[in-house]
Image (tube, helix red, strand yellow):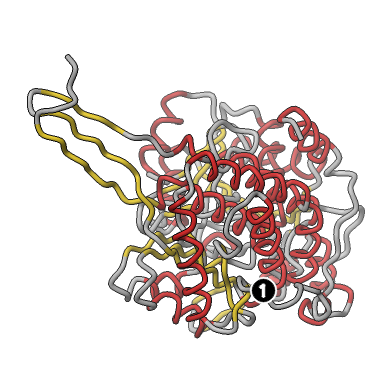
Amino acid sequence: MTKHEIKAIIDQTIKEFNKSPSFESSSAKGKSPAHACSTIHIGSANKWLCSDVEEAVHNAQRAQQVLLKSNLEDRARFISAMRDASRLHAKSLAELAHTETGYGSTAHKVLKNLLAADKTPGLEDLGTSATSGDDGLTLVEMAPWGVIGSITPSTNPTSTIINNAISMITAGNAVVFNPHPGAKRASQEAMRILNEAIKSAGGPETLLTTVNEPTLQTGNDIMKHPEIKLLSITGGEAVVAQAMKYPKRVIAAGPGNPPVIVDDSANIAYAAKCIVDGASFDNNVLCVAEKEVFSFSNITDELIKEMTENQGAWLISGSDIDKVARTVLTEKEGVYAPNRNFVGRDASFILKACGISFYSKPRLIIAEVPKDHPFVMTEMLLPVLPIVRVKDIDEAVENAIIAEKGNQHSAMIHSQLIGNLTYVATALDTTIFVKNAPSYSGLGFGGMGFTSLTISTPTGEGLTSARTFTRARRCVLKGDLRVV
């Protein structure tokens, strides 16, 4: 596909989103995701699909040595084949991920796969720098680490595999993946497709390896393996904390609870559309998605009206808020967490489970709540969005900082005031800050810049790309090769 064709697909999907039927998960139909995927055919045993971690690391090492002997033109050909295969299978991989996990929307997962295929940087991301002077010439080149251990999530399984694989192989590495057990079949199918694409382009067949049955234990085995020098972790706080225990380089994508601020200078109709588009995208499983709104009191009623009457949001109030909270959240000793049975589910599925009447097909549930409500303080990863009234920009920032919990992940604002745009961006200090657009614009989807599905906030790399998975090597030649 050309860039114009890809853009046309994205534009048409967004245009038809409101009138599209919701994609019910297998669990919503009375089947567990595991049962629904029990007959998925991954293919006969392959060298990339291994019985244990030791075999996976060994096969990846051998492939990486072959990759190192290939020239950059060869590597570019491998990456091009991976992109083409990802585009070709974007829909089937999205369907597989949705069937297996029950999370999100198939249509949106297609878009994420295409985004990863098209906007993950390639060899252009790897630049060589040179310094010359009286003492000669110094080159700094970006070199691979070798074999990377990568832990991937269930929320964005196939798009993360595509994104990580392109970045890491572009950088000259091989990868041993440990996909989330709840998305193992979809993740393995993505790896199979990419490995076959590399092989068809003349490359080694095991640059991406994994185990038949990924578990917490195989994840730990990968993280501690002596031949894996670099870890890329895309997951929750627990797996990030575990990875940090090992004496090796870790690139970690941690949690987020992104706030969005709407002041009274904003274009309210446009802000309402952006917020609902972003918060409902793939049923809010993206870590960058709007998770809570802080809205100036004098425009909150107008904002809610636009969201409900024109953008497909469903407002709950009174006892219905308590019903939803009891359903989608769990609580232990005052600490709230999302109920996994409702992560990534459709808004209509949640409303039905709560016994709340509704009509049409709402794509987002909204509720006006106080600033300390569990909806505000919990990263829920489902289409329930709290709205908190604030009197001014200072109160909005104060509350947003508390809700964001110092994750320094993502935040949004809708405003026409340069002073407020700058003040909020500086005060929140997040890795991604989006002004006057849906949250996903920060990933290059409808916004400028490259994309990444591994956004490294705890370790500070930000949106990862090929360059992230390299190490700098300096070569110094004394006195020669300078021609000036």
* Residue pointed to by mark 1: 46
Q: Residue at x 76, y 59 (%)?
A: 93
| Residue 362 position in % (x across, y down) | 83, 53
Nearer to me, 171 or 47:
47
Nearer to me, 384 or 381:
381
Say which quarter of the image contains residue 220.
bottom left
- For the C terminus, the quadrant is top left
| Residue 261 position in % (x across, y down) | 53, 41
| Residue 326 position in % (x across, y down) | 68, 75
Left or right: 375 as drawn, with respect to 87: left
- For the N terminus, the quadrant is top right
Q: Secondary structure at mark 1?
A: loop
| Residue 338 position in % (x across, y down) | 61, 71
Left or right: 213 as drawn, with respect to 26: left
Q: Relative to 53, say whether 250 is above or below.
A: above
Q: Amino acid at mark 1?
A: Asn
Residue 278 appears in the rendering: no
Residue 468 appears in the rendering: yes
- Crowd around label 1: few <14 · some 14–19 · many ≥20 (10 Å): few
Nearer to me, 477 or 236:
477
Q: Residue at x 78, y 76 (%)?
A: 33
Q: Residue at x 71, y 43 (%)?
A: 277
Q: Relative to 238, say whether 8 is above or below.
A: above
Q: Residue at x 67, y 38 (%)?
A: 274
Say which quarter of the image contains residue 183.
bottom right
Q: Relative to 205, say whether 394 is above or below.
A: above
